[in-house]
């Protein structure tokens, strides 16, 4: 059996970085896209000294006499202030530019304005409430690196630079094949011996959750010709193909011989992980094909911890393996197995602020209701027992599936 970490690495090694040309993408459509180039700040942030408060711009020394100061101008955000005259104040608002000659902002709560004069009640400190030009970002700073998958926060930061377009990698196109005579597509009538196909919609949703695109989805019966045609068509139209089912040792587990007949190199593994022992990696006409186990729980776990790093690399992303955290198991039932066991767990903080991991009551690969229930996967090492109070590695779905 292949060790889990070695399998994850071998899949990564089989993942080519993007080979297509980067493309332009409107800022408004950039959420979830992957930057193909570093973006450097051209303008400082903030671009000019401005007020952090609604109040008055003054010269600190002018307050020493304690007299009220004539209000020279009311300057709103979006207007140009006049240079501050000696012994005067300028009324301004949050975001208003600081007038030349002013060195301090007094918030309006500390002032009284009457008959065109402002009296400052609380002695300010020099420079208070002024946001300095460039204090956040200096021109030339890299504000988003190539390989970043853009979030709303990145979109906001990139907008400060006035960019209406960004250079991103084309979306990775993933082909999905579910296999099995027993499967019926949702929306169709189902006989007693049949099962609705949940792997295809699940894998499509997982792929889209990473910011990749579903190039095509197919279902094939357990028949060498049908499987071969489907894999060839998907390999032709997509950057990578994911199949589910038919990869174990049963008489109708035909995916392996079909891949071999298509002439691709093939590595079939029994990976030392649970759920998800049977996993295969092949290539058809240069397109990687990854075969996941048919049990939907196993396919979900394999996608999360084995396949997602590979897809991230093909998307052109950096940080292909999200951080693994650690948490304390809270369970009445210790876990042990000859394979690395990825328990479906919920995560919460205990009174001391420690991350506590509670396993779902059903941990066999047939218990699908554990998937939407879980926050992540807790990893129990192979050939070891871990029970209540033990610290284990934790793979949060929020980061491993994004
Ligand atoms: N004798 C052995 N039997 C099995 C072994 C083994 O080592 N020796 N391994 C077990 C493990 S572990 C797994 S995991 C499964 C994986 O088998 P396959 O990848 O060949 O998957 P199938 O047999 O095609 O299906 C397994 C299971 O999942 C259901 N399924 C399949 N596709 C879908 C779908 N798209 N939607 C919903 N459900 C699906 C299928 O009906 C089966 O119940 O093999 C074990 N057996
Ligand atoms: O490895 Mo299988 O995925 O446990 O049921």
Image (cartoon, rainbow, N blue to C red):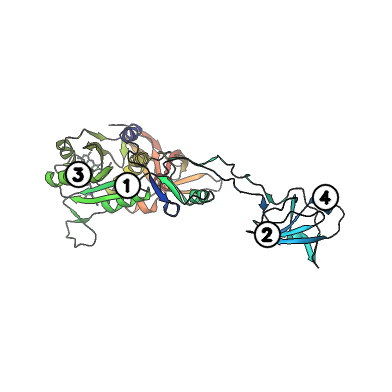
What residue is shown with label 1? 300
Residue 176 point in image, percent of width and height: 25, 48
Identify the element where label 3 is drawn: helix
Q: Distance from label 2 to label 1 (Cα)? A: 53 Å
Task: Nearest to the eye among marks 1 and 3: give it.
Answer: 3
Quarter of the rendering occupied by the N terminus: top left
Is residue 364 in sight in this rendering?
A: no
Which residue is denoted by mark 4 in the rendering?
61
Disc 3 beta carbon < 8 A from ligand 1? no
CA distance separating discs 3 and 4: 79 Å
Tell me the quarter of the picture where residue 314 sits: top left
Q: Nearer the viewer, mark 4 or mark 1?
A: 4
Q: Badge 3 is on which residue? A: 231
Residue named by callout 2 = 93
Q: CA distance from mark 1 to mark 3?
A: 20 Å
Residue 164, x across and y down, in percent: 47, 52
**Where residue 394 appears, x then y in whole percent?**
43, 41
Q: Earlier in the sequence, mark 1 or mark 3?
A: 3
Mark 3 or 4: in front is: 4
User: Which numbered disc, 3 or 4, marks the residue that appears first in the sequence?
Assistant: 4
Name of the residue lying farthest toward the right: 65
- Residue 300 spot, x, y in % from top left: 32, 47
- Circle count: 4
Looking at the picture, tell me which residue is in the foreground, 106 or 43: 43
């Amino acid at each position: 059996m292949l060790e889990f970490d070695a399998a994850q690495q071998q899949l990564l090694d089989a993942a080519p970085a993007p080979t297509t040309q980067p493309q332009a993408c409107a800022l408004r459509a950039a959420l979830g896209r992957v930057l193909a180039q570093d973006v450097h700040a051209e303008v400082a942030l903030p671009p000019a000294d401005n007020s952090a408060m609604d109040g008055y711009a003054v010269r600190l020394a002018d307050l020493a006499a304690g007299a009220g100061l004539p209000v020279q101008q009311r300057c709103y955000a979006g207007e140009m202030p006049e240079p501050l005259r000696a012994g005067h104040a300028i009324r301004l608002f949050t975001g208003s530019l600081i007038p030349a000659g002013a060195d301090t902002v007094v918030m309006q709560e500390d002032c009284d304005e009457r008959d065109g004069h402002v009296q400052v009640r609380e002695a300010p400190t020099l420079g208070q409430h002024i946001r300095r030009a460039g204090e956040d970002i200096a021109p030339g700073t890299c504000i988003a690196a190539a390989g970043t998958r853009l979030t709303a926060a990145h979109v906001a930061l990139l907008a400060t630079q006035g960019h209406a377009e960004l250079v991103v990698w084309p979306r990775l196109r993933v082909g999905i094949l579910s296999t099995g005579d027993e499967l019926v597509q949702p929306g169709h009538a189902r006989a007693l011996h049949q099962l609705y196909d949940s792997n295809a919609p699940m894998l499509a949703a997982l792929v889209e959750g990473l910011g990749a695109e579903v190039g095509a989805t197919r279902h094939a019966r357990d028949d060498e010709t049908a499987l071969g045609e489907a894999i060839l068509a998907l390999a032709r139209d997509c950057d990578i193909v994911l199949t589910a089912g038919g990869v174990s040792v049963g008489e109708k587990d035909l995916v392996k011989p079909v891949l071999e007949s298509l002439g691709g190199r093939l590595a079939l593994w029994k990976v030392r992980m649970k759920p998800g022992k049977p996993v295969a990696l092949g290539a058809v006409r240069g397109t990687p094909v990854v075969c996941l186990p048919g049990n939907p729980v196993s396919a979900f776990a394999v996608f999360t911890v084995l396949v997602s790093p590979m897809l991230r690399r093909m998307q052109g992303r950096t940080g292909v393996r999200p951080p693994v955290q650690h948490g304390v198991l809270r369970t009445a039932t210790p876990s042990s197995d000859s394979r690395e066991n990825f328990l479906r767990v919920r995560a919460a903080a205990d009174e001391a602020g420690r991350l506590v991991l509670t396993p779902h009551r059903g941990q066999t690969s047939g218990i699908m209701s554990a998937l939407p229930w879980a926050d992540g996967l807790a990893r129990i090492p192979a050939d070891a027992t871990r029970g209540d109070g033990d610290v284990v590695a934790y793979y949060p779905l929020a980061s491993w599936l994004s």
